[in-house]
Amino acid sequence: MRSRSADRERGSATAELAVALPAVALVLAACLAAIQLGAQQVRLTDASADAARALARGETVEVAAGIADRVSGGAALEVARDGLFVCAVLRAGGSGLMSSIELRSESCAVDGGR
């Protein structure tokens, strides 16, 4: 014979799971978005280094922008020359949940193309 307290608690595990599941899904989505943002920053860093080396070799800004665009997946290139160095600065926005975050990467190389 079952007690009355057991009847009142019937289905409570299902209700607790239904309440906790959206929170778990939100945390998982935030973790995946953070991983994607980190991967995008790595691509941006590689692209800025490639663009800086191309500019240092004497390539035009358009060629360097094409290299940066291909490697980074669509970042805006800014070029700065500082004495013996040429620097490539790339900026891109995050995507998905992290779209409000702006990513930035700067790489410099010795300007040998002058």
Image (spheres, rainbow, N blue to C red):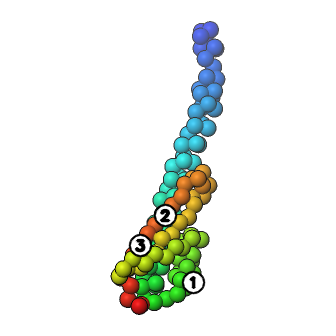
Please name whichever residue, 15 or 27, is drawn nearer the observer in this view of the structure: 27
Q: Nearer the viewer, residue 14 or 53?
A: 53
Circle 1 Cα neighbour tier, 10 Å, few/some/many (<14 / 14–19 / ≥20)? few
From the image, tell me which residue sits under label 3: 107
Residue ID at (42%, 82%): 53
Q: Amino acid under label 2?
A: Arg
- x and y percentages locating residue 30 in the rendered image: 54, 47
- The kind of secondary structure element at disc 3 is strand
Rounded to the nearest angstrom, the CA distance separating label 3 from label 2 is 10 Å
Amino acid type at image mark 1: Glu
Marks 2,1: beta carbons within 8 A: no
Figure check: 64 above or below 78:
below
Going by the picture, which residue comes out furthest to the front?
Answer: 83
> Mark 2 Cα within 10 Å, few/some/many (few <14, many 20+)?
some
Tell me which amino acid carries mark 3. Answer: Ser
Q: Is residue 71 visible?
A: no
Q: CA distance from mark 2 to mark 1?
A: 20 Å
Mark yes or no: residue 16 visible. yes
Check disc 1 and report its element: helix, strand or loop.
Answer: helix
Q: Which mark is residue 104?
A: 2
The image quarter containing residue 101 is bottom right
Which residue bears the numbered disc 1? 62
